[in-house]
Image (spheres, helix red, strand yellow):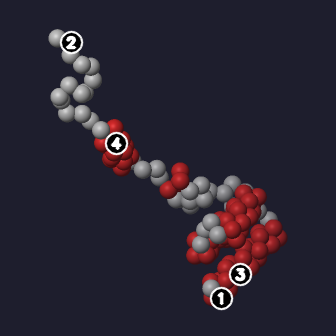
């Protein structure tokens, strides 16, 4: 007697839908067990530690980026103000190390303080 091929020979058959559901569950469990991506890899604007600035130009570049990110809504007002305060302390540190002139530091600090003032006014209005 010739036996039939496949799962139709009286044994239990596995539905492809159950295979798909099982594979999905296994993938989710592996994703959660093996580690989710860090916030820094998901959000490129996320900063975990305090940045180190080598000169006044790098501070000015970061200031422009913070201003753009805040105006586009990528970072909230509190985070923007905190990062701007960090920039002011970095500028003062650069000036004390002799890496920045007094005139250029004063100009950049006044621009940063004006943006902080704009942010606080925006928060008060919102």
Given the current orientation, which residue lies at the most extreme front position? 1
For label 2, the SS is loop
For label 4, the SS is helix
Given the current orientation, which residue lies at the most extreme top position? 1
Q: Which quarter of the rendered picture does the N terminus lie within?
A: top left
Q: Do labels 2 and 1 touch, CB within 8 Å?
A: no
- Where 23 falls versus 73 (above or below)? above
Q: Residue 17 shows which numbered tag? A: 4
Query: Nearest the camera: 89 or 124?
Result: 124
User: Is tag 3's residue or tag 2's residue first in the polypeptide sequence?
Assistant: 2
Q: Position of residue 76 (x, y in %)?
A: 59, 72
Q: Position of residue 119 (x, y in %)?
A: 67, 79
Distance from label 4 to label 3 (Cα)?
Answer: 56 Å
Q: Residue tagged by mark 3?
A: 118
Q: Which quarter of the rendered picture does the C terminus lie within?
A: bottom right
Q: Is residue 15 left or right of residue 111?
A: left
Distance from label 1 to label 3 (Cα)?
Answer: 11 Å
Q: Do labels 1 and 3 touch, CB within 8 Å?
A: no
Distance from label 1 to label 4 (Cα)?
Answer: 54 Å
Distance from label 2 to label 1 (Cα)?
Answer: 84 Å
């Amino acid at each position: 007697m010739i036996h039939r091929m496949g799962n139709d020979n009286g044994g239990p058959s596995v539905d492809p839908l159950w295979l798909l559901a099982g594979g999905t569950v296994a993938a989710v469990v592996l994703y959660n067990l093996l580690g989710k991506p860090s916030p820094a890899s998901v959000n490129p604007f996320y900063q975990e530690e305090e940045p180190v600035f080598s000169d006044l130009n790098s501070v000015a570049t970061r200031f422009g980026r913070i201003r753009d990110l805040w105006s586009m809504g990528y970072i909230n007002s509190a985070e923007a103000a905190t990062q701007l305060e960090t920039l002011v302390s970095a500028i003062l540190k650069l000036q004390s190390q002799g890496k920045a002139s007094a005139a250029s530091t004063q100009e950049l600090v006044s621009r940063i303080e004006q943006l902080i003032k704009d942010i606080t006014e925006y928060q008060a209005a919102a």
